[in-house]
Image (tube, rainbow, N blue to C red):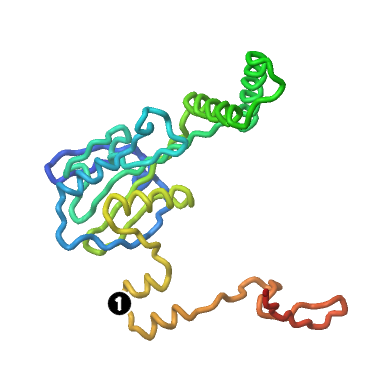
Amino acid sequence: MSTRPQALHASDGRCYFAAPMGFLSATSTIVRLHAKPPKNIDRIAIADAVSAHAFRDHDEVGMPKSDAFGWVTMHDPLVTEFDVTDLFFQQYLVVGFRFDTRTVPSKLAWIERRRLEESRMLEQGVERLSRHTKREIKEDVESTLLARALPNPKLFECAWNLETEAVYFSGKSKGAREKFSTLFRETFGVAPIPMIPYLAAERVGVSDEIVDGVREVEPSRLVPGAVDPAAPAMNGNGQGVLLQETELL
């Protein structure tokens, strides 16, 4: 498969060339979810809501966040102002998701705290610092080191089919999916639900009997020699020992 930048055509005729990552890369991991859009879709209001929840790497007072996440445009992760043509492609709402993390090495934080504590004790002429002073030093060190730490950015893409109610997200890590689901709910007012097998069975329109059958399916032992959780345990003589449930008072 070619890795050349692929063109995205917006409804107004504009053409974007996106970097080959996520949906546009040669390989990608896609997670399917389900979210029901509103009956009356106000595209301008949706664009405003996405802009209000766009990516910001600093908090309200200008300090960097340890975890920062938000929406970016699909064609450029530096663009955080949206209009209708940035988001809607035919029946799809397509948007990028950026998730940055900053970490401070624990040893470095400990060394800096010790250094400041020693300096503060010399200044005050005491042998021990109060708990309040230590907590204050700890918070100052963490904020200072966090401001110096470089972010580790991760970029994902989301495509929401407004006709079939299917949501496709190009990330499978637990942290990214949790932040994405939170942001999706805060932005669009609906929580995306993972497309687990019995939900998928409901979506394809099979009978209620089949859906109920899928729900009642129990795990099977597919590996030869694996221990069956329902089987009795064996004692040292090879005899079966039934494990009784113990009621905790």
Q: Name the residue at 65% across, 20% down.
A: 115
* Residue at numbered disc 1: 205
Amino acid type indicated by mark 1: Gly
Q: Position of residue 107 (x, y in %)?
A: 65, 30
Q: Position of residue 48 (x, y in %)?
A: 20, 43
Towards the viewer: 60 or 35: 60
Query: On the rendered image, what quadrant is the C terminus found in?
Result: bottom right
Q: Residue furthest right?
A: 237
Q: Position of residue 4 (x, y in %)?
A: 33, 38
Towards the viewer: 210 or 82: 82
Q: Give the left or right position of residue 226, taking residue 90 as reference.
A: right
Q: Name the residue at 62% across, 75% down.
A: 221
Q: Is residue 19 above or below residue 143?
A: below
Q: Name the residue at 59% across, 27% down.
A: 133
Q: Give the left or right position of residue 42, taking residue 153 as reference.
A: left
Place residue 124 in its image quadrant.
top right
